[in-house]
Amino acid sequence: MPADLSAWEPGVPDDAVAVTNRVALFQALLSLPARQRATIVLRYLEGMSERETAAILGCGEGTVKSQTSRALGSLRTYLEPEGIRR
């Protein structure tokens, strides 16, 4: 906590909250089946397109879309009870 409390801004997460959120996200990702986890990592963390992701995973773009959708739903369910702060 800064010595000067005027520098503190409500609503801005501090480092501890950010670390807690990253740990919760990592645990949520590990809870996903491998294919779903791969689509999330490639699409959102690596910034790949559906086409690029499909090529890497050796599947169709439709499969990438459905796996991504299922994974996002699972992540939402997993993370909501955790109270992830935005």
Image (cartoon, rainbow, N blue to C red):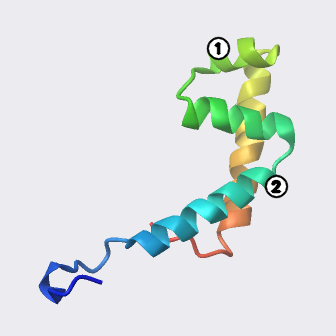
What residue appears at the point 74 percent right and 45 percent down from the top-left corner? 71
Tell me: 8 left or right of 14: left
Residues tagged 2 and 1 counted as in contact (Cβ below 8 A): no
Q: Label 2 is placed on what type of residue?
A: Ser
Q: Secondary structure at mark 2?
A: helix
Q: Please identify the quarter of the rendering in which residue 55 is found.
A: top right
- Give residue 24's position: percent from left, percent from top: 65, 65
Q: Earlier in the sequence, mark 2 or mark 1?
A: 2
Q: Which residue is mark 2?
A: 31
* Location of the C terminus (image quadrant): bottom left
Left or right of residue 2: residue 75: right
The residue under the point 47% across, 74% down is 16
Q: Nearer the viewer, residue 68 or 84?
A: 84
- The N terminus lies in which quarter of the figure? bottom left
The answer to whether 16 is drawn above or below residue 37 in the figure is below
Residue corresponding to mark 1 = 51
